[in-house]
Image: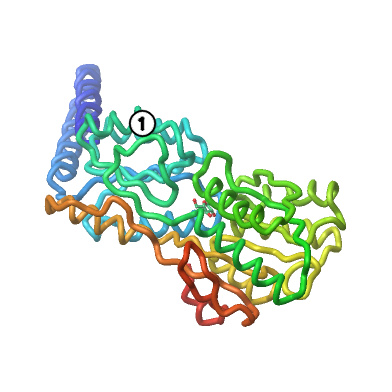
Amino acid sequence: MKKKFLATLLTVSMAATMLVGCGSDDDAKENDKQQETQKEDSDDSKGDGLITIGFAQVGHESDWRTASTKSCQDVFSKDNGYDLQFVDCDNDPAVQLEAVRNFIEQDVDYIIIDPIVANGWDTVLTECEDAGIPVIVIDRTIEDSDKYVSWVGSNFKTEGLAAGEWLKAYIKEKNISEVNALVIEGSKGASATIGRTDGFKEIADREGWKILDSQDGDFTQDGGQEIMESYIKSYEGKFNVVICQNDNEAFGAMDAMKAAGIKYGVDGDVILVSFDACTAGLERVMSGEINADFECNPLAAPFVEEVIKKLQNNETPEKEVYMEEHWFVKEDIIPSIEVNGESQDMTVVTQEIIDAQY
Ligand code: AHR
C-alpha cells in the first residue's frame, strides 16, 4: 500500500511540476504547499506504527455477515493499532481473488479471508506465501490449500448434525411419526452450506426421513422467500419440516408461508429450523416462529487478533480455533442432545440472552 501510494504521489508531483511551468507564481506556491502536505501525509503513513490488514469479506448478505464485519472493524481499528483495508466481495469469488491480489500488491502485513467458496485457493495462497504475507482464514473453510497460518470459525457439519439430532428428539416428544423436509441451502460451494447440508442429511438418512427438495437460497431473505414460494407451489400439504441454513432465509420462508396461510413454528403445522441465531433470529425463537436455531458465532475477530499478536511475537498460533456456540429453543422439553459423542445443552431463549446477542 505504502509503496503504491508513494508511486502515485510521485506521478502526481511530476504532473504538478509540469503544470506549474504553465501557471502563475501564486499557482506555483499553492502547488508547492500541496506537495509539502502530501509529503508529510506520506511520511506519517510510513511511520504510523499501525499493523496493516487486508480483509476480503464475503459480502453483506445476512445479519450474521453484518455482525462479522462489525466485529472485525471494531477490533482492527486505528485506536487499537491497525490500518484495516476492508473489501466487501459481494459474494463473487472472482472479486475476492482480486481483492487478495490487491492486498499483496499493497504489501499489507496480514490478510484475512472469509472464503466465499471452499475451492480455488491454492494459487493465490501460494502468491501470498511468496510475498511473505501471512493469511488468516475466518468462518468458512478452504479445502484445496493449507497455505494459511490459522483458521478461526465454526464446525458447520456439527451444526447440521445438531439440527438433525434435535429434530429426532423433538418429533419423538411431539409424537410425530414422519418427517418430510424441505431444505433451503446457503450459497453454492460455501463450506457453511456443504457442512450443514451433509450434517443434516446424515441424520435424515439414518432416521429414514424424506428430504423432498434441497435448493440454494444464497443465505439471503429474498432467496429464502423465493425458494419457499416455489416449494409451496410444488409441495403444499406434503411437508412438515423446513430447514433454512440461516436466519435471513428463515425470515423469507416465513413470509412465503404466511402469505400461503401455512402455520409454522411451535404452534404450527410446520417445524421451522434455522442457523446463525443472531438477535432477530432469537426474537423469532422467543415468539415461537422458529422452533430451533443453531448458532454460528460471527465474533471471530478477537481470536484473529490473538493469532496476529502471536505472529508479531514470533510465536506459532494454533492452526484451528473453533468458536463457542449455543443451540436455542423456546420450549423447555429437550434438555440436551448428543452430537459426535458429546452432549450439549439446549438453551431456552430469554430476553436477557437476546439483549446480549450480536
Ligand atoms: O459462513 C457463515 C454463513 O454465511 C452464515 O450462516 C450466513 O448467515 C452467512 O451469510
Image quarter (top left, top right, bottom left or bottom right) of the N terminus: top left
Nearer the observer, 211 or 227 = 211
Residue at point 84% right, 47% down? 234
Q: Secondary structure at mark 1?
A: helix
Q: Position of residue 292 (x, y in %)?
A: 62, 69
Residue at point 71% right, 70% down? 171
Q: Is residue 89 left or right of residue 248?
A: left
Q: Position of residue 134 (x, y in %)?
A: 24, 41
Residue 319 shows up from this direction: yes
334, above or below 223, in the image: below
* Residue 37 picture quarter: top left
* Residue 167 picture quarter: bottom right
Q: Which residue is mark 1?
A: 122
Q: Position of residue 273 (x, y in %)?
A: 65, 63
Q: Is residue 199 left or right of residue 25?
A: right
* Residue 298 picture quarter: bottom left
Q: Position of residue 220 (x, y in %)?
A: 62, 50
